[in-house]
Amino acid sequence: MIVETAPAKLNLALHVRARRADGYHELETLFVFARDGDQVTVAPATTPSFTVTGPFAAAVGPVANNLVTRAEAAFRQAFAPDAIHALTLDKHLPVASGIGGGSADAAATLRALARLHGLPVDTPRLLTIAVDLGADVPACLLGCPTFGRGRGDALAPVLGLGDMPALLVNPGVAVSTAQVFAHWDGVDRGALDLTGTTLERALAGRNDLQPPAEAIAPVIGAVISGLAASPGAILTRMSGSGATCFALFRDTEARDSAAKRIAADAPDWWFCATTIG
């Protein structure tokens, strides 16, 4: 039995540069990963199975549309056509939330299967499968701080944040990535500055999807405001296409104080006090 964590993905900055002819968008982004997330378990079996547990189990869609089962099917086709697996997804990240939950789950499934079958995680065919599964899956497969461009899948490692305290907050709304991109105004506001530290690059950047996401779900603005008003917050931003937002802090005391204060005002929101590598 192999167990893999599927950590929450954050976009410290996300610049949308242009619409592409293939229907995707030309992006520049800084990927980092939290220490917390979902968990995927893979084991050999005599009968295939897929079980979902955890607080967000009910929000997971049909098996045929799930990225975990799609990743497993693609892996078997490429590497182990006769293998049978029992899959378990322990779902702790909200769905359609901008922190790569489904992509992280798919990547964790690929890593777990690679370990089970004795394949290096950097096997080129494995990366090809990740690209086919979705734009964020390759970065989640690597699972380290990365600069992404193109669809977000042309990747180069960057220095991390050194276990910086972070607070992730989702107001309980699922935002469609396609809908958010459709509402992007098409204006290229410039490249992501690649000078300085990763944190300095993030501070100088922006998330071009935040305005259209706020137009679709105005509560995102309330989350941002609450985080930005927290003493000790260094950077406050929406991740990906939303609706999860985050704040980075210098110390865990400031992070935990912010979590306590915001939760008192919005007890139904989702919170994750974590660290970012």
Image (cartoon, rainbow, N blue to C red):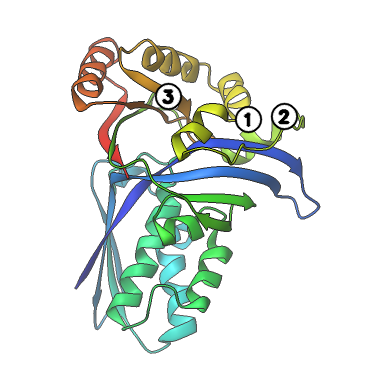
Q: Secondary structure at mark 1?
A: loop
Q: CA distance from mark 1 to mark 2?
A: 8 Å
Of pointers 1 and 2, the one earlier in the residue sequence: 2
Could you tell me residue 184's position as x and y percent?
70, 30
- Kind of residue at disc 1: Asp
Could you tell me residue 178's position as x and y percent?
63, 40
Of pointers 3 and 2, the one earlier in the residue sequence: 2
Quadrant for residue 76, please give it.
Answer: bottom left
Could you tell me residue 55's position as x and y percent?
24, 41
Please give the name of the residue rendered at 37% of the width and 78% of the height, measured from the top-left corner. 120
Q: Secondary structure at mark 3?
A: strand
Could you tell me residue 136's position as x and y percent?
52, 53
Q: Which residue is mark 2?
A: 189
Q: Residue furthest right?
A: 21
- Kind of residue at disc 3: Leu
Task: Report the side of 22 relative to 258 (left or right).
Answer: right
Locate the N terminus and report the quarter of the image it occupies. bottom left
Q: Nearer the viewer, residue 61 or 18?
A: 18
Q: Which residue is mark 3?
A: 235
User: Is residue 271 visible to the viewer in this orientation of the structure?
Assistant: yes
Q: Is residue 206 above or below residue 62?
A: above
The numbered dot on residue 208 is 1
